[in-house]
Image (spheres, rainbow, N blue to C red):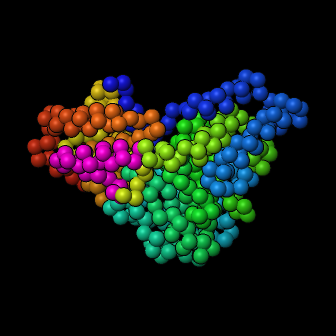
Amino acid sequence: MDKIYMDHVATNPLHPEVLDAMLPFFKEHYGNPLSLYEPGIKTREAIESARAGTADLINAKPKEIIFTASGAESNNFALKGIAFALQNKGKHIIVSKVEHHSILNSARFLEKQGFAVTYLPVDNNGLVNPADVEKAIIDETILVSIIHASPEIGTIQPIKEIADIVKAKGVVFHTDAVSSVGNIPVDVESLGVDLMTFAAHQFYGPKGSAALYLKSGTRIVPLIYGGIQEGGRRAGTENVPAIVGMGKAAEITKRDLEKRIAHVTPMRDSIISNALKIDKVILTGHPEQRLPGHASFVVEYIEGEAMLMMLAVKGIYSASGSACSSKALKSSPVLISIGIPVHLAQGSVVFTLGEGTTTEEIKYFNETFPQIISRLREISPYAQGWEGTEDSTCTAKK
């Protein structure tokens, strides 16, 4: 069995059609898009074509797409840009406890600048209660940001319902859709959001290319000052090949999305059903309202890193939701937020599938995963009744 890639939530391979579209802009078409002569005009036209294709994927207008270098940049831009643009109206922001670090750390930065932030809880499936959003909104609230789908537990939030509440209160609404755009249908008009973050590498485009959807008429302060690129909202010479790649990836995704969903969903279900037959394996995230190719678990008595290493030895590449590392002895805040005890959160593992995943690979995985768990439990010093404590950190460091 060849190497099996089951970490598509981290990134995806570049689609061959995307590479073909990008290559000329590394070589023949190298002009600066702001130049008035032919090479510059060529690259400017390519950027605007990519903008139109990217907008079409999410049912936006081309002028509502601002290209950035990453989902993290778009999230920083959204929170800081709206906060500083609207601070004279109020200085209160609402986010959930299961946001990406680029949202949570931006919120903490804004707290240091004098803003107040409410961090909303989630239920055991990782869902935000729309009623909690409504209760948290006060006269000073200027922005609500709720992630669309969790990369760690796969849960898809009721964004439209939340957006309806937020908009009725006259508050700006942003969603981080990095893990959802390209994996499920996303329509900004139907969702009712004012801003949305998404990234090309999540749908077989290049790394280093992302976007912020900004609904027409929404005020924002630039994150990067300098030139007039992106309508004066994001300065810096454009990364033309990456932008072209994002546009092409968006075009392919719109064409192939239904097929991709139909391909990965039954394989995801197979992984979940087989994993849950193993003793003391717990599914994390919502059992149905989750990303089509996403399966995540916590496994008692085993650390996530040990599982990842053993899986890699067997040729299976996956991820752990635990933030345990030599530099950060902390459990995943997402898992803690959904009520997973600290000692169990260390045993998290995430499997995410893509268009290249095969049924043969899933069969091999389903045979291999139980064997790995059995072997690790045989050698685990904690498999004989260790229960951990609320103060537990990464046991490998003890």
* Nearer to me, 35 or 256: 256
Q: Of all residues shown, which one is farthest toward the left?
A: 384
Residue 161 in view (yes/no)? yes
Judge from the rendering whether residue 143 lies leftward or rightward of residue 354; answer left or right.
right
Against 197, residue 248 (above or below) is above
Residue extending farthest right: 37
The residue located at (66%, 41%) in the rendering is: 247
Q: Residue at x 64, y 38 (%)?
A: 248
Front-lying residue, 127 or 23: 23
**Would you identify the image quadrant in which residue 87 lies?**
bottom right
Quadrant where the N terminus is found in the figure: top left
Looking at the image, is 318 positioned above or below residue 74? above
**298 left or right, relative to 77:** left
Q: Residue 120 appears at what percent x and percent y?
A: 44, 65
As drawn, which residue projects farthest toward the top?
Answer: 27
Residue 339 location, x and y as percent? 30, 59
Q: 356 or 351, which is in the foreground?
A: 356
x and y percentages locating residue 86 in the rendered image:
67, 65
x%, y% of residue 279?
17, 47
Confirm whether the magenta stretch covers residue 344.
no
Tell me the magenta residue range. 264-287
Can residue 115 be seen in the rendering of this structure? no
Most foreground residue, 155 or 384: 155
Magenta span includes 274: yes
Name above or below for residue 397 compared with residue 388.
above
The number of discs equals: 0
Q: Residue at x 38, y 51 (%)?
A: 153
- Residue shown at 67% from the left, 31% from the top: 21
Quarter that holds the C terminus: top left
In this picture, residue 384 sits left or right of residue 210: left
Picture quadrant where residue 191 is located = bottom right
